[in-house]
Amino acid sequence: MLKTLVVDDNDDFRRSLVELLCRSMPEMEVAEAVCGREARQKVKSLTPNLLFMDIRLPDENGFEISKQLKNRYPGMDIVLMSSFDMPEYRNAAEKLGAKYFLAKGMLTENIRLLLDTLQDSH
């Protein structure tokens, strides 16, 4: 079973993404976190296969959290997300080992393709 953690401080966006993931893959276990501290706690207890991480969180930088978590849990796939689709964000995501970078505005269009790809790899 694919276990997923969605980390985003925007309640509406986070809930929408969780609903989309649950509709797309009903067998997926999905947890939520709103900040870096909570994300670390949930990763430790859930050990997700997949992490959706916003790069701007109220307490920490999503890039830094993702880098630390990727080092600690190398098998976890990370999808970094931002409202801004900037090349420097894509490059930073690639350098830290994130599997994907998604612009939040294009998430709905790309989520099925992303989930199909991830499901094939697990």
Image: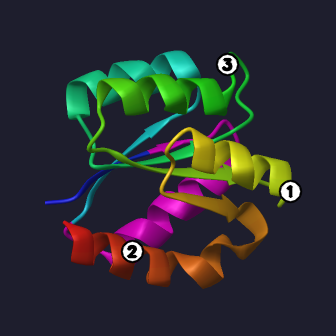
Does the CB distance between marks 2 and 3 fall below 8 Å?
no
**Residue at left offset 30%, top offset 37%:** 74
**Residue at left offset 62%, top offset 77%:** 108
The vertical placement of 19 against 69, above or below, is below
Question: Which residue is the site of mark 2?
Answer: 115
Pick the front one: 15 or 76: 76
**Residue at left offset 42%, top offset 68%:** 21
In whole angstroms, how far apart are the C-alphas of marks 1 and 3?
A: 20 Å
Which image quadrant is residue 71 in? top left
Residue 31 at x, y percent in the picture = 36, 43
Q: Was residue 16 drawn as part of the magenta stretch in this picture?
A: yes
Residue 60: mark in rendering? 3
| Residue type at numbered disc 1 | Met
Query: In the image, which residues are magenta?
Result: 6-27
In whole angstroms, how far apart are the C-alphas of marks 1 and 2?
A: 23 Å
Q: Quadrant of the N terminus?
A: bottom left
- Determine the residue located farthest toward the front in the rendered image: 95
Residue 113 at x, y percent in the picture = 47, 83
Q: In the shown orientation, is residue 38 left or right of residue 55?
A: left
Q: The residue tagged with tag 2: helix, strand or loop?
A: helix
| Residue type at numbered disc 3 | Glu
Residue 43 at x, y percent in the picture = 33, 29
Dot 2: within a 10 Å radius of its alpha carbon, few (fewer than 14), some, or many (20 or more) residues? Answer: some
Q: Nearer the viewer, mark 1 or mark 2?
A: 1
Dot 1: within a 10 Å radius of its alpha carbon, few (fewer than 14), some, or many (20 or more) residues? Answer: few
Say which label, 2 or 3, has the lower sequence index: 3
